[in-house]
Amino acid sequence: MATSPENNKESIYASPKMRAREQQLITETAAGNEKAFEQLYQLYFSRLFQFIFRITRTQNGIEEVINDVMYVVWDKASTYDQTCRPSTWILGIAYFKALKSVEKSVADEDRSFEFNDELDYFPDKGTHWVSQVETSNWLEVAFSQLSTEQRAVVEMTYFQGLHYNEIAEIMQCPENTVKTRMFHARKILAKSLQDD
Amino acid sequence: MNSKINSNHEHRKVWSLLPWFINQTLSATEQARVESHIRTCITCRIELKQQRQVYENIQQAELLQQISNASFNQLKKRIDTQPASLFASFRKRLDNFQKFFFQFPGLGKQFALTFGILLITTTLIFNATLEKPQAGSEYRTLAQSPEPLQEIKKPNLIRVIFTDETDVAQIDTIVSSVYGHIVNGPYKNGVYEILIDSEQKYSMEATDAIRELRDNANVIFAELAHVSLSSE
């Protein structure tokens, strides 16, 4: 079933009306208006949840990361200069918080393996089991093959509806890097879709 | 030669812009550039079609479903990191169990019912055991002794508690008045065990003695010791 881009949530996120409303909420938040901040929080919760989940690939502690992000928004609202879209600013904060969360979970995983050295004596850890389950969802397979940065680019392009220069701003990298990450990611996505 | 190089450069440029052509965020100039190129480039048209398909599939993917899948995969990974022998042993037992019940259709339901009843009964018995007051921490009567119970040989045994003001001489007088003598006590809780000397049936004599003791102002408590010799 074809999806009309006009009807997508990306279009809603990107609409000038929405942008103006979000800018207003940030301005009021900067002035200490808790109601405005709460509205901004509610407005962004599901969007941030999706964004962070697609980068971290785990729902563990997502609410905590969201609250970390929104705490920064509350604390630094006065520094938002309105030159970029509110979503670019907020997703930029979320991107780095999500990366931190990934790093932390990797470190935790490493530590947990330190206490499981005996597992190395079992040659077949049954990874085939995982792959069997994963094939039930092509997107799951595809996303698991992407790097964190590639997932972020795909998420910001196809889910959040951002332009590559906004993505570059969020990821604090050159625009060509964004395109290169997307180049590799889309090949994997297309292959996974074909294999499904 | 130059035009071929330019064409390749243009192709690569447009090819890299396709995702943003799909999400409609390109500037008007970039959009026109892509539209112009794809009119003549079949490779880019195929890629565009494929990426649109990816985009549409991604859009349709339920986030909750993805979360559920990702969670399940994490669980599987955790299971897979368990020692293989342990897991294999469990799986084997599970398989055998399943095979057994497949041989007898309907037996599974009966087993589930029996198992359920057994589980409830066990839980009730276990709870009943746990609900008994713990010695030292809860109120308890003299009949609820923490000491191991011993069957009594002489049933006309009475437990008595006297007031603090009652001295030893008074206690002796009171005990003698009911034809009894102290066999044990006082314990830490102030209980004396008094054996009633009687040739009659214990219930009558002991009952009379208890009634008399209860009428005495120096006696706080008096009851028949039915099952235990220990009152501490």
Image: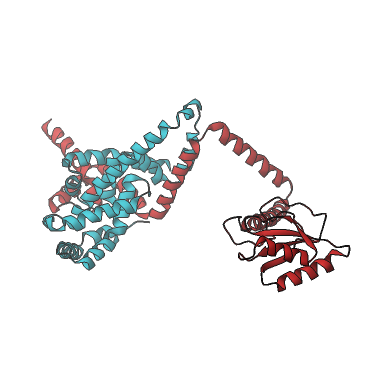
Residue at image x 30%, y 51%? A65
Please give left or right for residue A177 compared with residue B54 in the image.
left
* Among the 4 quarters of the image, the one containing residue B207: bottom right
Residue lying at the far front of the rendered structure: B169
Please give left or right for residue B28 compared with residue A193 in the image.
left
Q: Where does residue A178 sit, x and y in percent of width and height?
A: 21, 42
Q: Where does residue B2 sit, x and y in percent of width and height?
A: 11, 32
Rendered-image quadrant of the C terminus of chain B:
bottom right
* Among the 4 quarters of the image, the one containing residue A10: bottom left
Q: Where does residue B168 sit, x and y in percent of width and height?
A: 67, 60
Residue lying at the far bottom of the rendered structure: B215
Q: Is residue B139 above or below residue A191?
A: below
Q: Is residue A85 above or below residue B91?
A: below
Residue at image x 49%, y 36%? B80
Looking at the picture, tell me which residue is in the foreground, B174 or B147. Answer: B174
User: Who's cyan, chain-wise?
Assistant: A
Looking at the picture, tell me which residue is in the foreground, B146 or B88. Answer: B146
Residue B169 visible in image: yes
Looking at the picture, tell me which residue is in the foreground, B70 or A190. Answer: B70
Rendered-image quadrant of the N terminus of chain B:
top left
Residue B160 visible in image: no
Q: Where does residue A129 sit, x and y in percent of width and height?
A: 50, 38
Rendered hue of chain B is red
